[in-house]
Image (cartoon, rainbow, N blue to C red):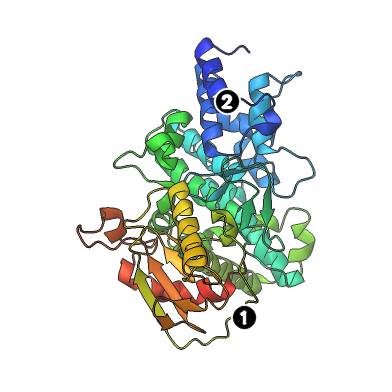
Amino acid sequence: MHCSAAAVLLLLAVLSARTQAALLPHHISSLIPILQSLEVDDTPDIPSLVRALGGCGTPVCHTLLGDPTPTPKPIPELWKLLAHLLHPNATAAEHGLALAPDGSTVALAPLFAGIEVGLKRAAGWPGPIDQPYAALDPLYAVTITEALGTSFLMAQVNGTAALGPDGCWDDVDNPQSFTLLGPPSLVPDAVANGAMDGVLLGTRLAEEPIPLSILFRRYYGVENGITSGWPHSSRRRRDFGALTAVGKLEEEVVAMLRVLRGLSPTREIMEEFGEEEEADIAHRAAREFMEVYVECPAIIPRCMWGARPYRGTPRPLSPPLGSIYIHHTFVPSAPCRSFAACARDMRSMQLFHQDTRGWDDIGYSEDWPHGCWSVWVLQRLDPGLHGWWSNGGQWGTSADGHHINSIPMIPVMEPGPSGHQPNECRPCGPQVVWTTTQ
């Protein structure tokens, strides 16, 4: 397999001054030129190639999607770049992840598995016909329900967390290493993001198959490629909730648990549970997943926006709090439109509050930079003073932009992930405040 001149130029744009695949940033933007180069070379069935190089390799994925593309030896150089993004370190627990332009981290395995199902459906694939797999919706099975059902099953047995946590990259400009913020579950936030993206993009491709490089540019908005009328990753929670009712997800988890009864090692575990307990696990799994990842906005932790340390000796907040203060910022004067711009705004506000105002930390506890789509965690500690009033033991919320001379941009005025208008963003507040640890 030889790359065309155009493909080589595309890869040079990705690698820039870097000389080794090990230095390739784990950005979605790094993945797009690789996909385009594979398309230029007429590489067949790219999602299957992804499975062969380190994508979804579970028994359910293999049964539903078939054998992946054979990998030749030696592996072509272009494939090595893709393999590095999928699995850079055989011993790393946090592998196969990419940072999206909206600031979210996406697991590539469920993302490409959903894309593979969508392309198969576009080609007329009828789906599985043998029981118990025939009862599964393959799009949900290979993206979320196998991991979700197994995770809640293991949590029932071991008392461990079934969802989360989030994590942080070592460098958001050149992400190489991702570290979870707590003990891992089988559905950390990155897997949830990748699964929701896989369902949304698989559904779209089944109706309108297009080259994957174009798909990624449109969906992730790389290089300002946001296209009118197309879904966008910053709205994945809202769009997934519109596509997937909690009852639908519960039905799919029930069907998956029945499949897992026949697979090792879950076969032995499920011998302890009857049909009623099985139904209860599926109900809790679907409800809690939708509550955490659909009804509430994404949470951007301090380590992702590059926060400075707290100055002095912090005092932990002690709920319940007396009040919440909501403040529109004068600077920044308008909501940010990208993760990089939002991160700069957060750092700028913290620098002003610490260096000019002389406060211990940024004066807000959380920030909503562009409507209800994401919450940026600014503090989990007592913020000291905010503006002209004492904020000891209070909660300060900021919304970017003062809108003195202009009305808010349309995205700020649109409903958030669960249909909430900006003035209705508080239903998830208690979870934002009390479960965030970084």
In this orientation, which residue lies closer to the viewer: 228 or 410? 410
**Residue 188 location (% of width, % of height):** 63, 57
**395 in relation to 96, above or below:** below
Which residue sits at x=56%, y=39%?
27
**Residue 206 location (% of width, % of height):** 42, 38
Q: Residues within 10 Å of mark 1 (few under 14, many from 20)?
A: few
**101 in relation to 284, above or below:** above
Specify whether residue 143 is in view.
Answer: yes
Residue 53 picture quarter: top right
Q: Residues within 10 Å of mark 2 (few under 14, many from 20)?
A: few
Residue bearing mark 2? 16
Specify whether residue 52 is in view.
Answer: no
Disc number at residue 46? Answer: none
Residue 214 picture quarter: top left
Q: Nearer the viewer, mark 1 or mark 2?
A: 1
In this orientation, which residue lies closer to the viewer: 187 or 138? 187
Which residue sits at x=72%, y=65%?
154
**Amino acid on which the number 2 mark rests in the picture:** Ser
Spatial CA distance of label 1 from label 2 is 45 Å
Picture quarter with the N terminus:
top right
**Residue 336 location (% of width, % of height):** 38, 52
Q: Is residue 419 left or right of residue 147?
A: left
In this orientation, which residue lies closer to the viewer: 425 or 292? 425
Which residue sits at x=42%, y=85%?
323
Residue bearing mark 1? 315
Picture quarter with the C terminus:
bottom right
Q: Mark 1 vs mark 2: which is more N-terminal?
A: 2
Q: How many marks?
A: 2
| Mark 2 secondary-structure assignment | loop
**142 in relation to 306, above or below:** above
**Amino acid on which the number 1 mark rests in the picture:** Arg
